[in-house]
Image: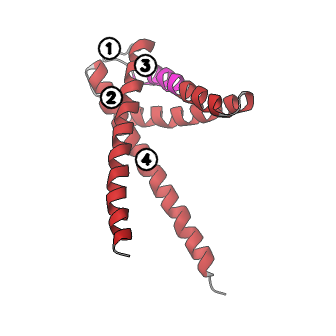
């Protein structure tokens, strides 16, 4: 019995999704480390930043499910963005410590989270522009 073409394509798609998720988490941890360095003044451990990213994504997903149960429409999207920001700042404050081992404070954690989001928005715009140029060029030759 051989594998069908559809099953092989589905497996390749799942593999691509896993690779993109892993690369996304690794990149997010690097960006969080840079944002923390810009605000606090030193680079945290990469493993701590990686743990903070994973914990933030899990906690934000749970929080967004809860927000989705309460609200509907565009107000729910805006509220879930705010909840994700606040949860991310709380995780940064809890996991990424200052050089002396104390917490950096929720205000600084909010600034770290804000810079983290701005860096990701800039990277997303650059990536979207590159994709538009690449795929637009492919469509122009078709």
Q: Position of residue 24 (x, y in %)?
A: 43, 47
Q: Position of residue 20 (x, y in %)?
A: 45, 54
Residue, disc 1: 100
Labels 3 and 1: the sequence-earlier one? 1
Whole-number angstrom distance, CA of label 4 to CA of label 3: 22 Å
Q: Position of residue 33 (x, y in %)?
A: 33, 32
Q: Nearer the viewer, residue 95 or 128?
A: 128
**Element type at marker 4?**
helix
Whole-number angstrom distance, CA of label 3 to CA of label 1: 20 Å
- Placement of 55 over or under 93, stated as above or below: below
Q: Nearer the viewer, residue 95 or 123?
A: 123
Labels 3 and 2: the sequence-earlier one? 2
Rendered residue at 32%/28% (across/down): 35
Q: Nearer the viewer, mark 4 or mark 1?
A: 4
Q: Position of residue 70 (x, y in %)?
A: 73, 27
Q: Residues within 10 Å of mark 4 (few under 14, many from 20)?
A: few
Residue, disc 4: 24
Labels 1 and 2: the sequence-earlier one? 2
Tell me: 8 left or right of 106.
Answer: right
- Residue 105 in view (yes/no): no
- Magenta residues (range): 85-96
Rendered residue at 71%/28% (across/down): 71
Residue, disc 3: 110
Labels 4 and 1: the sequence-earlier one? 4
């Amino acid at each position: 019995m051989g594998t069908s073409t559809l099953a092989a394509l589905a497996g390749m798609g799942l593999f691509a999704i896993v690779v993109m998720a892993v690369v996304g988490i690794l990149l997010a941890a690097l960006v969080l480390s840079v944002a923390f360095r810009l605000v606090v003044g030193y680079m945290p451990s990469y493993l701590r930043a990686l743990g903070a990213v994973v914990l933030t994504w899990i906690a934000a997903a749970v929080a967004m499910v809860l927000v989705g149960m309460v609200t509907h429409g565009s107000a729910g999207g805006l509220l879930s963005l705010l909840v994700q920001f606040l949860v991310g700042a709380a995780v940064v404050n809890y996991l990424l410590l200052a050089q002396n081992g104390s917490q950096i404070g929720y205000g600084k954690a909010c600034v770290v989270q804000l810079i983290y989001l701005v860096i990701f928005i800039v990277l997303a715009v650059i990536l979207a522009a590159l994709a538009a140029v690449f795929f637009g060029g492919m469509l122009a030759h078709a």
